[in-house]
Image: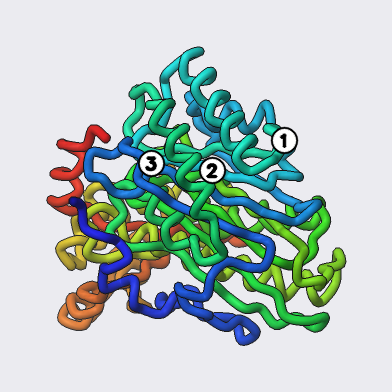
Amino acid sequence: MSPDPSQHPNAALPFFRSRWVPAPGHVRELGLQAGLPSGFRAAGVAAGIKPSGNPDVGLLVCDAPEPVSAARFTSSGTPAAPVLVTRERCRLDALRVILANSGCANAATGRRGLDDAAKTQGAAAVAARADPAAVALASTGGISHLLPVEAVLKGILRARSQLAREGDGAFQQAIQTTDLFEKRANLEVALPSGSVRLSAQCKGAGMISPRFATMLCFIETDAELSAETAELLLGVCVKRSFDRASVDGQLSTNDTAIMIASGASGVRIAPESEDELRFGEALDALLRALAIMMVADGEGARRIARVVVNGGHSDGVEAAARAVANSPLVKAALHGGDPNWGRIVQAVGAALPGTAPLAVDIAIEGMQVCSGGAAIPYELSALEQAVQREEVEYEVTLPGEGAETEVFFSDLSHEYVTINADYTT
């Protein structure tokens, strides 16, 4: 049996544990035992997809008469069958059921994969008494393996009988693969019009370089949102969270993020209101904290980093930030606690080639080490101590003004290579 991520020491830490994402003052952590917001039930069961015997089929249902939803998916040119079926056959603003599985991505499986996904979608619709167009699919695991449909169908039947508001923990376990600890939260958000609940379950540790989504993330709230508000808030918050995270620079075929609002609290969030602002702040903090958890769980990661790049233009700062975050040399130095900032210079220069030297400034944990592209005096022992922290911040300033971006990333460890040399399921 694989280790239970719910028993990992990180699972007992506060949800808002990173200095880069403080808890908003109007948000209160309720703990992992608080259950889902009103109007939601979930379950997770072991259906035999994963050899480990761990839960691998999850079902989440919104019982509200007219739920509102929004979704984001991978931008990969080889999207998996569950992504294609959900995008093409679902009403993405009116989802009420999520069927998720781990142990098989159902990606690169052709027409057979699409048919298999559709079969499971239909079965989940029957089990939840919902229209198939309201059932979203999500899968994670090895690419190219055919989905064991019979196992999934049996899992759906078992999960249906176990649906409960307290089922989010089992659902969380059912969506995980190489995750070492759970990435979920139950929050209470105080708004001018009243309090609402906000919950999320997320998985991801490797193959992380999302564009507009993450590996898998599901968000539930009992707030009453319009479809337009849900779409706006999820889109903005995903861009500031999961789109800012990288473990290994690899874009998944299955990235999916879905938010469903039941409206069961009776608290309506009107567009351009103080309620919308404060709810958006809570959602933003929630997703940013989850993104950092993914980075921290980056398959053998010892340390995580945040690179902030400013100056120049938007394309330039983005290219430079991604180059630093995805550089094997920078990531290896981060793992070893090595203050070799020359690797940052190399990564930025490779991302922004030119004939004239780039007048770049670099600071590590607030200590400037490079100005105008040249080394300046600094206290080496203090820098060596700073890069031994669990969270390390790099700041890169390019010539010019007007643009800024950030990327959170993990180090590159021996364990990462070991895990991915052997990974097949």
Tag nearer the camera, 3 or 1? 1
The residue labelled by disc 1 is 131
The residue labelled by disc 3 is 102
Q: Is residue 361 visible?
A: no
Which mark identifies residue 175? none
Q: Does the residue at mark 1 contact the one at mark 2 (Cβ under 8 Å)?
A: no
In the image, what residue occupies the spot 63% across and 45% down?
A: 97
Find the residue positioned furthest to the top. 111
| Nearest to N terminus: mark 2 or mark 3 | 3
Disc 2 from disc 3: Cα separation = 13 Å
Disc 1 from disc 2: Cα separation = 20 Å
The type of residue carrying mark 1 is Asp
Q: Position of residue 290 (x, y in %)?
A: 47, 63
**Label 3: how many Cα within 10 Å (few below 14, some 14–19, many 20+):** many
Q: Is residue 314 above or below residue 369?
A: above
Q: Is residue 25 left or right of residue 296?
A: right
The residue labelled by disc 2 is 256
In the image, what residue occupies the spot 28% across and 39% down?
A: 50
Q: Does the residue at mark 3 contact the one at mark 1 (Cβ under 8 Å)?
A: no
The type of residue carrying mark 3 is Ser
**Label 2: how many Cα within 10 Å (few below 14, some 14–19, many 20+):** many
User: Which of these two is toward me, 419 or 338?
Assistant: 419
Q: Is residue 398 visible?
A: yes
Image mark count: 3
Q: Is residue 29 above or below residue 354?
A: below
Q: Position of residue 288 (x, y in %)?
A: 51, 64
Tag nearer the camera, 2 or 3? 3
User: Which of these two is toward me, 318 or 149?
Assistant: 149
